[in-house]
Amino acid sequence: MTKLRIGMFAWESLHSVKVGGIAPHISELSESLASRDHEVHIFTRNGGFRDYDKINGVHYHRVNHDHSGSIVHQMDRMCDAMYCRFLDVRSKYGEFDVLHVHDWHPINVLYRIKNHFDLPFVITYHSTEWGRNGNQYGGWWEAQEISHREWLGGYEAKEVIVTSSVLKNEIQHLYQIPDYKVTIVPNGIYSGKIRKDVDSGKIKKEYGIHPLAPVVLFIGRMSFQKGPDMLVEAVPKVLDHRWDVKFVFIGEGEMRMHCEDLVHRFGVSHACHFLGYAPDEIVRDWNNACSFVCVPSRNEPFGIVVLEAWDAGKPVVATDSVQLVDNFRTGITVYQNSDSIAWGINYILDGLSTNTMGKEGQLLVETKYDWKEIAKATLEVYCKVV
């Protein structure tokens, strides 16, 4: 393939504002594309950084904008700033071959660019507003506007990328995107990114946990979509099976207070530790110090936490919304209720054929989900529009 000039548009990255799973996807995919001698420009929010940097071969163009008002109004102003920056970058570097937008946040800027310059663009859906809220939002105008922009992105894009078959079914059901336009390209991870030699006993002791106690780890937004409340409801059932198990919750969100209230009502607060938002190194430490990771999601477009657990060589207990797990080979798949989640956790705790699960997952990280493979698949999508 000839060298491409690629414009990436996202509201977060590893080297600007970091919010969730889009940040590593944007930066690490772009680095992998740049390593193949393509020219990649990321347009994103500033977050206290310089307006421009070139990091690991990738051009970062960061914009400032007014942060007042609703998230929709903030993204409108971000898109205005991105459009102005895009015009400057285009005049300096030359015409772009393909533009790539991630989720709904930058849709308006791509719509404007398309109307003025007729440049092809690709959209990657990382999730949907319906999936994030579990269809809980009803008539909330902001959620409806976000959903409209998600539909607009799929309608206007030349090609659509989704990270899983679950998400493909979801966006086609919601937005009637034709099958010929959609390609599944999974998320990725650098092998060894999470893997680390740690003194697990020392890490546990820092949080008042016995060094030999098994630890179940939850990492993610404390939201309805991610199902931390179902895991909390499973805690008493697990403790009835094995009294010394501890649960560590890493993440913030609207359900944190509810979950903390539940553990007090159940009388299991001694077994649960809520760390809130944690820096990357703390997350990495716990991935390596825990016994295994639990992903109790009600809706999971992909599940990067699964790849991170596997990279650390840990098995996973995940609900059937997570399609990454090969049941009884790389982890345990359970139903979306507390009884089933407790059963899966107890199965792992009993050590029934689970000793090789983490290693099997680690092998997948090194092959199927390596960024080189993801970049190759993404370039194949670009070929369709260039």
Image (spheres, rainbow, N blue to C red):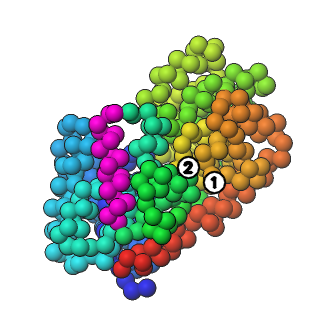
Can you give x and y, in whole percent of width and height, for residue 78 in the image?
Answer: 22, 51
The three-letter code of the residue at mark 2 reads Gly
Q: Nearer the viewer, residue 99 or 353?
A: 99
The three-letter code of the residue at mark 1 reads Leu
Q: Nearer the viewer, residue 175 or 113?
A: 175
Residue 219, compared with residue 360, is above or below; it is: above
Mark 1, secondary structure of its residue: loop
Can you give x and y, in whole percent of width and height, for residue 23 in the image?
Answer: 41, 53
Q: Residue furthest bottom?
A: 2
Q: Which mark is residue 120?
A: none
Mark 1: give few (<14), some (14-19) or many (20+) Cα within 10 Å.
Answer: some
Q: Which mark is residue 324?
A: 1
Q: Are marks 2 and 1 in contact (CB under 8 Å)?
A: yes
Q: Which residue is mark 2?
A: 303
Can you give x and y, in whole percent of width and height, for residue 290 in the image?
Answer: 66, 39
Q: Earlier in the sequence, mark 2 or mark 1?
A: 2
Q: Residue at x 48, y 52 (%)?
A: 173
Q: Quadrant of the C terminus?
A: bottom left
Specify the quadrant of the image occupied by residue 66.
Answer: top left
Q: Residue at x 26, y 43 (%)?
A: 72
Is 347 included in the stretch rendered in magenta? no
Mark 2: give few (<14), some (14-19) or many (20+) Cα within 10 Å.
Answer: many
Is 141 included in the stretch rendered in magenta? yes
Q: Quadrant of the N terminus?
A: bottom left
Left or right: 338 with respect to 103?
right
| Residue 93 appears in view | yes
Which span is picked out in magenta?
139-157
Q: Nearer the viewer, residue 263 or 227?
A: 227
Q: Residue at x 61, y 26 (%)?
A: 232
